[in-house]
Amino acid sequence: MKKIFLLGTLFAVTGFLFAGCGSQKSATTDSNEGKKEDKIIKVASHMPPMTDVVKIAGEAIEDGYQVELVQVNDNIQYNELLNAKEIDANFAQHEPFMQKFNQEKNGDLVLVQKIYNAKVGFYSKNYKKVTDIPDGAKVALPSDVSNEGRALAILAEEGLIKLKDGVGFEGTIKDVVANPKRLEWLSVDLLNLAEAYNEADVALVYNYPTYIAKVGLTPKDALILEKNIDDRFAISLVARKDNKDSAKIKALKKAMTSDKVRDFLIEKQNATLVPAF
């Protein structure tokens, strides 16, 4: 009986040692997986060429990092995901749009780097000259305040309306103090403005190259293009206050301002945008 007890004890000790080795291996594996995960940078975006820029930045990234594109379908998710710390950064918006999100959602998003300025303006299916636009014509404007202000500033620059002194790109329809053609305003979600172009009773539609491309148009087809670009509207890399100075975001910023990205913007996208770095 004594021998059996000792043998059983030996098996018990041996089993304990093997179990200990197994646990140690598992812990090491978990640790390595954790380190690997730390090298993944999740960036949300939604449409070309923004998604293209993220992919090219992924090719240019250094120091063992990997860029993972998180593609979304609207202009809400990429900020919601970032604010909830489910991703590391996003690339889909300009600074005024980001600031509006922060105000409305108590966000702490911050601009990290301006990447490019889109060529924006107004398109018309029925008119070839601004002077041909009739009195009482309908004008489709973006429904969000930041883009509405930019659109109105372009119309003011063209002489179609006059805005209250000093409002600049931050004006709203309420700030229109002179409207000699009695233009009628239609407020449309930015993602749906391209569809308004085909409406028979809409004379002018504001839009970005990214969205107007849905109906086969480019800035060359615009009836009115923005003349004085305000750099605040540059499409930018955005992070949060708590991670903006992290190694991940520094590596991502370097990749997104690399020669590889710049060459893509200049050689492939010069008809629709201008690099901002």
Image (spheres, rainbow, N blue to C red):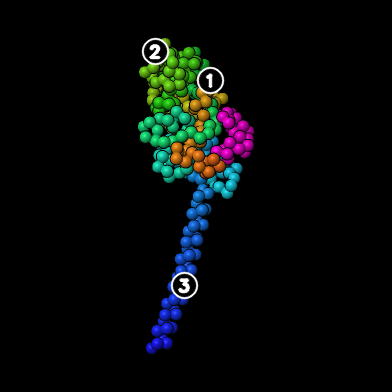
- Mark 2 = which residue? 177
x and y percent of residue 255 in the render? Answer: 58, 40
Q: Earlier in the sequence, mark 1 or mark 3?
A: 3
x and y percent of residue 41 in the render? Answer: 51, 45
Q: Label 2 to label 3, Cα distance in Å?
A: 84 Å
Q: Nearer the viewer, mark 1 or mark 3?
A: 3
Q: Secondary structure at mark 1?
A: loop
Q: Earlier in the sequence, mark 1 or mark 2?
A: 2
Q: Label 1 to label 3, Cα distance in Å?
A: 73 Å
Q: Residues within 10 Å of mark 3 (few under 14, many from 20)?
A: few
Q: Label 1 to label 2, Cα distance in Å?
A: 21 Å
Marks 3 and 2: in contact by CB < 8 Å? Answer: no
Q: Which residues are magenta?
A: 253-277
What's the residue at 48%, 36% (across, down)?
A: 238
- Mark 3 = which residue? 17
| Residue type at the position of mark 3 | Leu
Which of 276/35 is in front?
A: 35
* Circle count: 3
Q: Secondary structure at mark 3?
A: helix
- Mark 1 = which residue? 228
* Residue 106 appears in the figure: yes
Q: Is residue 260 magenta?
A: yes
What's the residue at 54%, 40% (across, down)?
A: 250
